[in-house]
Image (cartoon, rainbow, N blue to C red):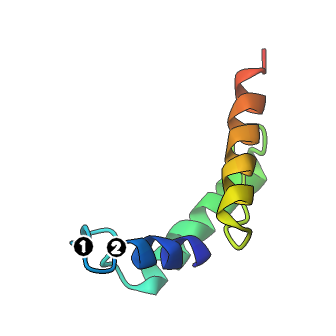
Amino acid sequence: VDGLARARARAVGQAVDRIEREPEHFFERVRSVYRQRAAADPRHWCIIDASLSMESVAAAVSEAVLSYCDRP
């Protein structure tokens, strides 16, 4: 929900795509599926806390990608 709020805030005054126009319950369902996948396979899925600052989110994403790339 935090990530969606950020995306919608960036889109003020701009055209939004079909996905961004979906109702909040759509995103809650998507979020639920991703969380299930992350719980089932944490080696290949990562949950990023979007309630953090954008800088912290970017750092967490970067760290997750680098960590994944360093795996054998």
Toward which corner of the image does residue 50 lie, by quadrant? bottom right
State whether residue 35 is above or below residue 16.
above
User: 38 left or right of 22?
Assistant: right
Are discs 1 and 2 less than 8 Å apart at CB? yes
Residue at 78 percent of width and 31 percent of height: 67
Q: Quadrant of the C terminus?
A: top right
State whether residue 19 is above or below residue 28.
above
Residue 68, percent from left and from top: 73, 30
Where does label 1 land, which residue? 14
Residue at 70 percent of width and 23 percent of height: 69
User: 17 left or right of 27?
Assistant: left
User: 20 left or right of 16?
Assistant: right
Looking at the rendered structure, the kind of residue marked 1 is Gln
Q: Real-space Cα distance between discs 1 and 2?
A: 5 Å
Where does label 2 land, which residue? 11
Looking at the rendered structure, the kind of residue marked 2 is Ala
Residue 71, percent from left and from top: 78, 21
